[in-house]
Amino acid sequence: MKYIEYGKQNDEIIMMLHGGGLSWWNYRDEAEILCDDYHVILPIIDGHADSGSQFESIELVADKLIEYINSNCNGKIKVLCGLSLGAQIAVEMLAKSSGVCEYALIESVSLIPNKLTEKLIGPAFAMSYGLIKQKWFSRLQFKSLHINEALYDDYYQDTCLISKKDMIAFLKANTRYSLCDSIKNTKATIKVVVGEKEQSNMVKSAKEISKIVPNAVLDIKKGLYHGEYSLNMPEYYVEELKELIR
């Protein structure tokens, strides 16, 4: 795993975990806004372009990040953020280490396993993986994600560098992940965000974690699709993050 850092001169640390198939640029705009006041760490999750490691499991990535925080951040950071796969990793970190952060902003997390989807991922990507480097196919995929057009070049460049093995591995992990009971012990104040137009399992997952964790607040964003909040609305995202801290 590699780490992109902004505002190293600052003491208060924010770690932001990108979505599956994306990379650190998921939170680049937020980091550029925050870096005057915070030390922002953007890990490149295992299995993604330039990460330097293959993806094995959500649990292992969470362990690595907790170890990094213990070794480099005195065992605790100010805020932990995550989108989609990154949100699952963040939730796993909160479950494994109750004091890993003071605040968490969890966006579009899936906590309801889907065995059928998991079984279909391997065959589907065996047939379609070769198309990833085709611009027309990449454009169709990008459009379906509702991502800001300014991020297309980053998206195309990095998806072309993800191996088929890694892509299948983290997509399968994403579809099989479920919430650990130990999340109840977290000391963090949590904001759970989900788009109104996301799939029903995402909304159900957001509601589930907000019920289980005593100090969690649910925010269903009107009119938004999966991941649109952090990817397309960085100014609003940062303002909400600062409000959470306040």
Image (cartoon, rainbow, N blue to C red):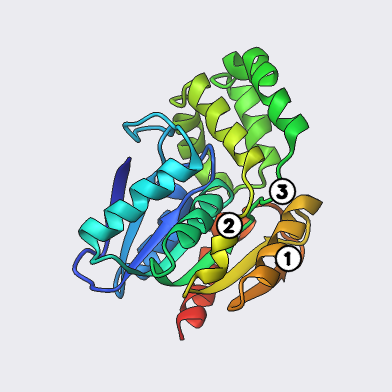
Label 2 amino acid?
Asn
Of 115 and 168, the residue lying toward us: 115
Query: Residue 36 placed where, x, y %?
Result: 29, 72
Query: Mark 2 = which residue?
Result: 232
Query: What x and y, as percent, mark residue 56?
Result: 45, 32
The residue indicated by pointer 3 is: 112
Secondary structure type for disc 2: helix
Mark 1 vs mark 3, CA separation in Å:
11 Å
Neighbourhood count class around disc 2 (C-alpha, 10 Å): few under 14, some 14–19, many 20 upward: many
Q: Nearer the viewer, mark 2 or mark 1?
A: 1
In the image, 123: left or right of 37?
A: right
Circles 1 and 3 in contact, beta carbons < 8 Å: no
Crowd band around label 3 with a 10 angstrom C-alpha radius: few (<14), some (14–19), many (20+)? some
Is residue 117 shown to the viewer in this render?
Answer: yes
Q: Which residue is mark 1?
A: 207
Tag 2–tag 1 contact (CB < 8 Å): no
Residue at screen point 33% across, 62% down: 40
